[in-house]
Image: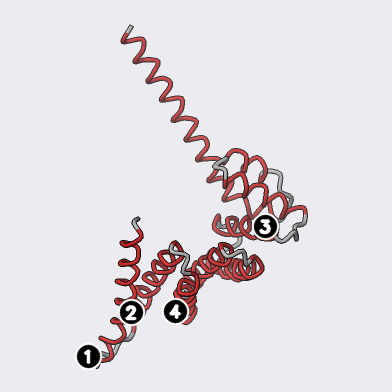
Amino acid sequence: MPHGIRRSTALFLLIILLAQPLAAEQSGMVVKGEIFFAGRQGRWTLLIALTVLLGTEENYGLAMDAADKAFHIAESSGDDARAATALRYKAVLFEEQAKYAEAESAVRQALVLREKSVGPEDPAVADLLVTLARLRRRQNKLDGVEALLARAGARLDEDDLAGAVALLAGLPEPAARQAQPWLARARARLAAEAALGRLVEQALGAGSRAGG
C-alpha cells in the first residue's frame, strides 16, 4: 500500500474512533446492553487496524497507544480472546523495536488469557509458545524445550512447515500434548499439499500423453 494511502487510511480510522463517542454524547443517546458491547467491539476492531497501519509506518508510539486502548476495551468487556490478540500485537511492536523483554512479558500475558479462553491444547496456544521461545532465544534464556520450539519457529519463518513438524514431533510431555492440535493441522496441510502435487503431476502427464 502506498505511503500516502496508508496515512490517509490511518487518519480516517482515527476520525471514526474520535467521532463515535462524541456523536453518542451529543445526541444524548444511552448506549447499553448488546448495542453497547457491539459498539465496543467495533472500536476494538478499528483500533487493531490502526495498530497495524501505524506499525507499518514505524510510528511505534501511536501504534502502541492504539494497541493499549484495544486491550483495555477487551479487558473491560471480559473478552479474553480479544485482549490476548491486542497483547500479541503489542508484543510484535516491542519485538520490532528490539525490546525483547517487554515483548516476552506481553506474550506471557497473552498466553494466560488465550489458555483461559480456548484451552491449553488450542493451536493458538502452540503458536504463542513458539513465539515465546523465539523471544527467549533472542535473550539467550532457553531451556531444552524452548530451544526446540525456537528452532521450529525458525523453520516456520523459512516456510519450512515439514521441518517444523519434524522438530515439534520430538517434544516431551506436557509440551507434546499442547502441540498436538497444531501438529494435526500442520500434517493435514502437508498431506493436502502432497495430494495436490500428485494431482498436478497426473494432469500434466495425461496432457502430455494426449498431446503425443
Query: Does label 4 or label 2 sit earlier along the sequence?
Result: 2
Image location of residue 136, percent across then percent down: 69, 60
Identified by mark 2, the residue type is: Glu
Q: Residues within 10 Å of mark 3 (few under 14, many from 20)?
A: many
Which secondary structure, mark 2?
Answer: helix
179 and 89: which is toward the camera: 89
Image location of residue 50, percent across then percent down: 39, 69
Query: Does label 4 or label 3 sit earlier along the sequence?
Result: 4
Q: Which mark is residue 27?
A: 1
Identified by mark 4, the residue type is: Ile
Above/below status of 152 relative to 74: above
The residue that appears at 34% across and 63% down in the rendered structure is: 6
Q: Quadrant of the N terminus?
A: bottom left
Q: Which residue is mark 3?
A: 133
Q: Residues within 10 Å of mark 2 (few under 14, many from 20)?
A: few
Distance between the Cα atoms at labels 3 and 2?
39 Å
Q: Nearer the viewer, mark 3 or mark 2?
A: 3
The residue that appears at 54% across and 42% down in the rendered structure is: 159
Query: Does label 1 or label 3 sit earlier along the sequence?
Result: 1
Q: Quadrant of the C terminus?
A: top left
Query: Does label 4 or label 1 sit earlier along the sequence?
Result: 1
Q: Nearer the viewer, mark 4 or mark 2?
A: 4
Q: Which residue is mark 2?
A: 34
